[in-house]
Image (cartoon, grey):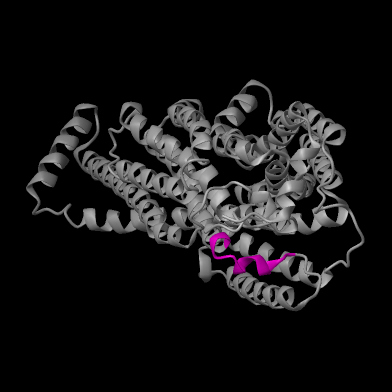
Amino acid sequence: MAVNDRNSASDYAEYAGPIRWVILVSVMLGTIMEVLDVSIVNVAIPDMMGNLGATLDQIGWVSTGYIIANVIVLPLTGWLSARFGRRKYLAASMMLFTAASFFCGTSRSLNELIFFRVLQGTGGAALISTAQATLMEVFPPQQLGMIQGIYGIGVIVAPTVGPTLGGWITDTYTWPWIFFVNIPIGIVATTLVLLFLRDSRYQQAGRRKVDAVGIGFLAIGLGSLQTVLERGNREDWFDSQMIVWLTVTAVVFLVLFVWWELRTPEPAVNLHILRNRGFTAGTVFALAVGFGLYGGVFILPVFLQDLRHYTAEQTGLIFLPGGLATMFVTPIVGRMVNRIPPRILAGVGAVLFAVSMYMLHFLTMDTGPEHLFWPLVLRGAALGWIFIPLSLATLLGLAGRELAYGTGLFNLARQLGGSAGIAFLSTFLDRRTVLHNARLLEHITPYSAAATIRIKALEAGFISRGSMPAIAHKQALAAIQGTVYGQASVMAFNDAFLVICFAFLGVLPLLLFFNKGLPVGIRGGATMD
């Protein structure tokens, strides 16, 4: 393992020990705000609809606008840090996010709320990628695994507790308070950044040519792609002319973006870092992680609340052991990365995650919290095994400004993977439910002894409660159809968890492309053998 000379002059040498921990607290506060706001809003949607007089289709843009803005800015965070300086850019992003949170809470119309959610998403992009790059430069190599473990707790656990917290705030107070709670946190985080963080020697503010063409191509391409992922299922995918044209637009402008960024001398996004095979493999792996993490968090609450009729609070409590497992495992894995190659740890985590999804593949209508405990604990532990090792294995070998660009692209991949996971699995559930329902109904015939006995028993029950025989027969058939549809839905959920399982197993070969060494010297641009 060879480490170049820049490692001896790393940024961490400029900070006293306690100051590093203050910076960790500040960036973690910002990250938790950003990650929570992706999921915390969803449970308040019904209250927003009633208060703002919006339809479900209209209110969906409150979430969609936030994510689109976030996705567009994420790959630009490296360039923005270099142009304005890391300290100013991170502090300005926190201030924008905090101010937008206030105006989201005071919005009195749907258009106002959507506008300020877009601003919030714009500010939120730096709160993950720039924060992660900052920690990797502020702390010394021997503490890197532990620090990423602490940081990872916020990134992984926040999406799990977001819906529960949002439900409690909405029920106890009103929906604007899911935004107002960000204000004191944002003020503290911004103050700490301005007081204690300095610009990276690789990211000091300077005059740089604005790559307006590249930024324009990126904004249109990613904005169109994210809209397709967010709205595709609701618009019935390619049966909608809007989705067709948005897909064409996304493909054309993203191709133009790649072409332009590879030829312009001062690109907004440094795509040349994709030549690093470990980084490219890790970025693709992050797509699968986002697919499984956000997709799984999306479909299991739907199963629990729609089919098992649990409340949002009960659902949150069911998820709690998994979150605690993540919090317990992540710091332990953070210490292990200095002894065991990150790619090995990430591989173990991916296998554990696949096993947990396979265990959830056996859901039934009688599944309760006691049946979900161990699969969710294993899932939570698996996330702890994946997050830090994958981040470090992906970013090994990136140095200086490359690190900022790399964290932006890496987090973009996870975000897009999550959007793709939710879009695909929601459509998959609908279509598999229809398929299973049709197959099950094929067995409900006058020649099926079991079906006939069940229908007669239901008819007798309805007649005993006062229904006429003809009406009782229709009620019995409706009850049978409801039971069959419920079973078909359960089978569709089982199929969905199996898809997530196969997705994680499918990316395991990518581990062969990761660097084999330990993460010492990462910020100096170590070459791992």
Q: Position of residue 428 (x, y in %)?
A: 41, 57
Observer-nearest residue: 193 or 168?
193
Q: Is residue 323 above or below residue 63?
A: above
Q: Residue at x 86, y 66 (%)?
A: 210
Left or right position of 432 against 73: left
In the displayed structure, 106 sits above or below 235; it is: above
**Relative horizontal placement of residue 390, taking residue 255 as reference (left or right):** left
Quarter containing the N terminus: bottom right
Q: Residue furthest right?
A: 207
Q: Position of residue 37 (x, y in %)?
A: 66, 39
* Residue 135 screen position, x and y as percent: 69, 41
Q: State the extent of the magenta-drawn residues as a range.
A: 269-279
Residue 278 is inside the magenta segment: yes
Quadrant hosting residue 365: top left
Q: Is residue 400 left or right of residue 148?
A: right
Considering only vertical position in the picture, is 504 above or below 267? above
